[in-house]
């Protein structure tokens, strides 16, 4: 298939996915777009929002429009790593012979919904580390590859502090995007209420299967990026590093740690997906700026001062965006 | 046009517009700064004692500011930079800059083609004048304000403190005087380089001092001190040079003769006017006369009755006469008879033609006679010595040199008769005594005389030649001395100019009116002092300063004339005032106590002492040559 046709296919798929998801999810365009960007970027998504906003529904809908194997894991404090990854159990054959057999856990799927991920203990949360980064699971002394594509869509509730365990930094860094799910608007709320209380059942159509998705993910990586745009992405990441020369004032003041290179990768990939999704063949500054918050907000570690002032990483990211100019060279004709 | 070409063309156009806009912007800023600077300078010039060169800078500042700013626009921006600019200004979302980067990628790259096509589609829709408008920036508009204010300041009067004005005037005076002094001295050095090294050095030093005054512009007092010091030095040097008795003799001889009588001058002037261009050029008149004589036979032939048959000869004669008449007119000689002769020839009137031609010849002869008469009148004031003795006695060195050369020539020629030799011996012998005043010349003449008596004519010729060379050397030294005296005079004039504060021109102006220049600033002249356009040819019509009118001389009861022919007792004791042609005496106003009360010295003693001092000063050449006459006369009168 020619590049042009692939791009056309990507756009058609993108539009179809948006349409199908919109049949179920009312509003939340930014959330849906962010989730799809992460999907095509090959990354995992952490959805954060108060209960009842449709986070789980979104992931479930996504699993329905994608012809992918889907598993849901409800994270609870007593959930064990083996409950996620799977375990060797003794199986007795009809002849009476017994042997250990690996019983695959719910992680063995294309799309895994880790619902309320912060309710599990860090030990259990960490069970996802290898799977999320290396797309493989090590159980006993055996390494088992996960089927591609592999995505983890996690949700978490920010308001429940009792009985929750904040995700460790290493875990957070493995999420491509952290998307905040906000309240719906008045119209959206009305539509949600009307749709969910009418009894009508909407079944979204399948749009994309695994191999096609993998092909489109490969296409995304081919999108060209101009040198100065790439430089902008680098400068944005560098500006989050406190204690360094290029650090933005907000980053220097409120951050303990800045973004890892993984954040930069996520930023650029997200830019590429967004460019294609918006009908362009190149990444623009706007693409990066649109992706910088979901790509970096969970990778920045606030210091005590920021915590004390009640600031969020989004505040720091806004400061970084203000501080870092798009073009580092002097404007011509000035 | 391909997508890439479309993009590149758009980038080129935009790059040029960007550069122009930058030049406009920077030029306007430069104009504003320049205008502000000009305003500040204009205000500063009106309030502070800034130099006049500021007036040149004021109009230049805005122009230079604008040009300098425009020059800072620099080179045309790169394609990448222009692409980024267009991306930003036209919201192309980095399409163009990405396309420019991918332009160098191989054609097989699908993304390159897609990006270029996408960018070219956007570029075609661009409106470059709208994206990069060329307007006069606000700074350019604002610069009109300081420029207007700057122009308005020219209407304001300039304030300068009296102290500053005095300093300026002094500086200008010093500069002008220094310049004049340096120029005059340099001119003197160029026209006649002194033979004596000391004189050359002294004059060079004087020229350098003048140049230094012009360049460094010291205060007036310092300049006066410098000039006084240099004047003392030059006077001392001139005195040393003049101490040579031979030079003193030459100096006495070189004094201007008594002024020619007014009648004589008037006659000479009248003759000069009549002679026109032929005055002082008898050879021109002789040439004209010779050519007219040469035409006489042809004229006689043309006057014959049978000459009518040869029109070619008449034509040639008429042309030759016309050429002659034209030349005469060009020489300033009016010959109406010649014109009449040409007219008669053309009218075929042979009788009148011959008569007019004779008249023309007579006119030319008359002019030649007038020229000779003028020369005779001119030579009346110069009476060269008849022989070597008189010439040496009269200080006529050039004539004496000529006489010596003639004597040498006679001695070297073989055909010298005994009578001539005797005469020559007598002349040389007679000249020995007067030659004593000329250093070695007397000795050489004495030797020559003895050698002639001994019949050694060759040795005598050598001695006479040595005498001639000695005279030439003395003449040269004397010329150096005069040059030095002129330099001292210039120095005095410079001192006077500076001391009086009236400048070089006023210091050098002679009092009284005359035909040679504008009237002076002396007492009693009625002409405007600043009159520049003086026309001598016009003034001759009414200037009667050269005409002697004894009948109109004011004579009082006690004025009995000069006492010519009167007995000793009847000679008038009244001394007529004389107007010196010299420069005004330099004077320096000195503050001091005036001496009051009765003199404790008798008048006669004081007068005698003054006379002695004057005599000493005159003999030591402490008095400038131009003033020596009046000084001598004054103190001579004091004796009476």
Image (cartoon, coloured by chain):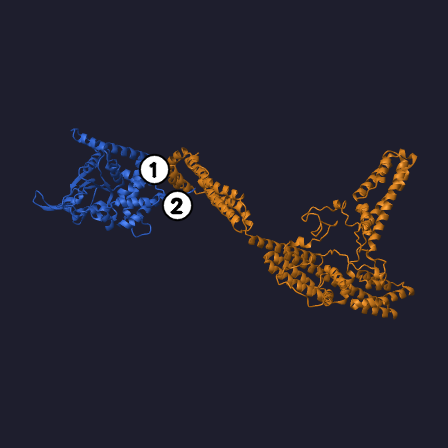
Q: Closer to the camera, A208 or B570? A: B570
Q: Position of residue B631 (x, y in %)?
A: 73, 61
Residue A179 picture quarter: top left
Tag 2's secondary structure?
loop
Count how many numbered circles sit on residues in the image: 2
Q: Chain of mark 2?
A: A
Tag 1's secondary structure?
loop
Q: Closer to the camera, B353 or A254? A: B353
Quick check: A87 left or right of A311?
left
Question: Looking at the image, is A176 positioned above or below residue B204?
Answer: above
Q: Which mark is residue A281?
A: 1
The crowding category of the residue bearing disc 1, from other C-alpha atoms within 10 Å (few below 14, some 14 to 19, many at least 20), is: many
Q: Which residue is mark 2?
A: A329
Mark nearest the camera among 1 and 2 is 2
* Chain in orange (letter): B
Q: Are marks 1 and 2 in contact (CB under 8 Å)?
A: no
Residue A230 picture quarter: top left
Quick check: B514 left or right of A258?
right
Q: Quadrant where the C terminus of chain A lies?
A: top left
Q: Position of residue B325 (x, y in %)?
A: 82, 41
Residue B459 in view, yes or no: no
Q: Quadrant where the N terminus of chain A lies?
A: top left
First in residue order: circle 1 vs circle 2:
1
**The hue in which chain A appears in the rendered picture of the protein:** blue
Q: Chain of mark 1?
A: A
């Amino acid at each position: 298939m020619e590049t042009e046709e692939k791009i056309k296919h990507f756009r058609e798929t993108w539009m179809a996915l948006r349409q199908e998801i919109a049949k179920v999810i009312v509003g939340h365009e930014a959330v849906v777009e962010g989730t799809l960007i992460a999907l095509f970027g090959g990354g995992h998504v952490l959805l954060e929002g108060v209960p009842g906003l449709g986070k789980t529904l979104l992931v479930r809908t996504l699993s329905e429009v994608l012809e992918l194997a889907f598993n849901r894991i409800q994270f609870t404090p007593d959930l064990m790593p083996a409950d996620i990854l799977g375990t060797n159990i003794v199986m007795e054959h009809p002849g009476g012979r017994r042997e250990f057999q690996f019983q695959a856990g719910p992680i063995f799927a294309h799309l895994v919904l880790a619902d309320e991920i912060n309710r599990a203990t860090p030990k259990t949360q960490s069970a996802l580390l290898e799977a999320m980064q290396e797309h493989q699971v090590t159980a006993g002394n055996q390494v088992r590859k996960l089927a591609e594509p592999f995505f983890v869509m996690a949700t978490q509730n920010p308001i429940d502090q009792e009985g929750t365990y904040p995700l460790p930094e290493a875990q957070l860094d493995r999420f491509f995007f952290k998307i905040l799910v906000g309240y719906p608007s008045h119209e959206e709320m009305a539509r949600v209420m009307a749709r969910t209380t009418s009894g009508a059942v909407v079944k979204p159509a399948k749009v994309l299967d695994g191999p096609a998705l993998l092909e489109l993910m490969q296409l995304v990586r081919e999108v060209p990026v101009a040198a100065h745009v790439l430089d902008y992405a680098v400068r944005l990441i560098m500006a989050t590093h406190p204690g360094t020369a290029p650090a933005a004032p907000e980053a220097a003041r409120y951050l303990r740690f800045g973004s890892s290179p993984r954040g930069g990768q996520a930023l650029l990939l997200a830019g590429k997906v967004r460019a294609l999704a918006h009908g362009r063949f190149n990444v623009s500054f706007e693409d990066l700026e649109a992706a910088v918050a979901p790509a970096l907000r969970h990778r920045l570690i606030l210091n005590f001062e920021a915590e004390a002032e009640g600031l969020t990483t989004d505040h720091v990211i806004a400061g970084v965006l203000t501080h870092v100019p798009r073009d580092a060279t002097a404007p011509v004709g000035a | 046009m391909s997508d890439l070409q479309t993009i590149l063309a758009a980038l080129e156009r935009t790059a040029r517009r960007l550069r122009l806009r930058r030049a406009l912007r920077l030029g306007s800023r430069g104009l504003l700064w320049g205008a502000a600077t000009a305003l500040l300078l204009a205000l500063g010039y009106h309030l502070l004692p800034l130099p006049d060169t500021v007036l040149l800078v004021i109009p230049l500042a805005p122009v230079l500011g604008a040009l300098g700013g425009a020059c800072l626009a620099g080179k045309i921006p790169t394609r990448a930079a222009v692409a980024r600019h267009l991306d930003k200004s036209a919201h192309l979302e980095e399409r163009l800059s990405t396309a420019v980067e991918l332009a160098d990628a191989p054609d097989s790259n699908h993304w390159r083609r897609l990006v270029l096509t996408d960018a070219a589609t956007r570029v075609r829709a661009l409106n470059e004048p709208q994206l990069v408008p060329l307007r006069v920036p606000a700074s350019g508009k604002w610069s009109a304000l300081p420029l207007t204010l700057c122009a308005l300041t020219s209407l304001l009067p300039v304030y300068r403190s009296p102290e500053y004005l005095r300093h300026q005037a002094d500086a200008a005076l010093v500069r002008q005087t220094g310049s004049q002094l340096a120029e005059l001295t340099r001119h003197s050095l160029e026209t006649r380089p002194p033979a004596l090294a000391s004189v050359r050095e002294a004059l060079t030093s004087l020229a350098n001092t003048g140049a230094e005054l012009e360049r460094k512009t010291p205060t007036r007092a310092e300049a006066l001190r410098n000039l006084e010091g240099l004047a003392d030095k030059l006077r001392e040097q001139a005195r040393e040079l003049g101490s040579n008795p031979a030079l003193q003799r030459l100096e006495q001889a070189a004094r201007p003769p008594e002024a020619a009588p007014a009648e004589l001058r008037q006659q000479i002037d009248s003759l000069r006017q009549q002679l026109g261009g032929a005055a002082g050029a008898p050879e021109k008149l002789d040439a004209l006369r010779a050519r007219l004589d040469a035409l006489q036979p042809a004229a006689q032939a043309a006057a014959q009755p049978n000459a009518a048959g040869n029109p070619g000869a008449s034509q040639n004669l008429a042309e030759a006469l016309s050429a002659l008449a034209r030349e005469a007119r060009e020489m300033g000689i009016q010959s109406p008879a010649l014109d009449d002769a040409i007219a008669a020839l053309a009218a075929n009137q042979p009788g009148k033609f011959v008569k007019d031609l004779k008249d023309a010849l007579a006119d030319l002869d008359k002019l030649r006679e007038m020229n000779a008469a003028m020369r005779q009148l001119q030579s009346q004031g110069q009476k060269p010595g008849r022989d070597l003795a008189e010439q040496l006695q009269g200080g006529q060195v050039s004539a004496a040199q000529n006489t010596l050369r003639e004597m040498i020539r006679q001695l070297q020629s073989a055909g010298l008769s005994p009578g001539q030799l005797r005469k020559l011996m007598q002349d040389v012998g007679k000249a020995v005594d007067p030659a004593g005043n000329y250093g070695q010349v007397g000795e050489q003449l004495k030797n020559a005389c003895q050698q002639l008596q001994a019949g050694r004519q060759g040795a005598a010729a050598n001695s006479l030649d040595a005498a001639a060379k000695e005279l030439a050397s003395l003449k040269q030294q004397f010329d150096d001395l005069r040059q030095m005296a002129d330099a001292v005079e210039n120095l005095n004039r410079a001192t006077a100019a500076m001391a009086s504060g009236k400048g070089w021109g006023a210091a050098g102006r002679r009092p009284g009116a005359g035909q040679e220049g504008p009237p002076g600033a002396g007492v009693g002249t009625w002409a405007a002092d600043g009159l520049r356009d003086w026309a001598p040819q016009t003034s001759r019509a009414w200037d009667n300063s050269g005409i002697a009118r004894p009948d109109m001389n004011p004579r009082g009861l006690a004025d009995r004339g000069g006492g010519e022919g009167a007995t000793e007792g009847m000679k008038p004791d009244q001394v007529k005032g004389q107007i010196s042609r010299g420069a005004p005496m330099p004077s320096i106003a000195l503050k001091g106590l005036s001496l009051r009360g009765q003199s404790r010295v008798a008048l006669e003693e004081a007068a005698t002492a003054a006379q002695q001092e004057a005599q000493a000063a005159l003999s030591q050449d402490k008095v400038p040559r131009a003033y020596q006459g009046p000084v001598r006369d004054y103190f001579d009168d004091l004796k009476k």
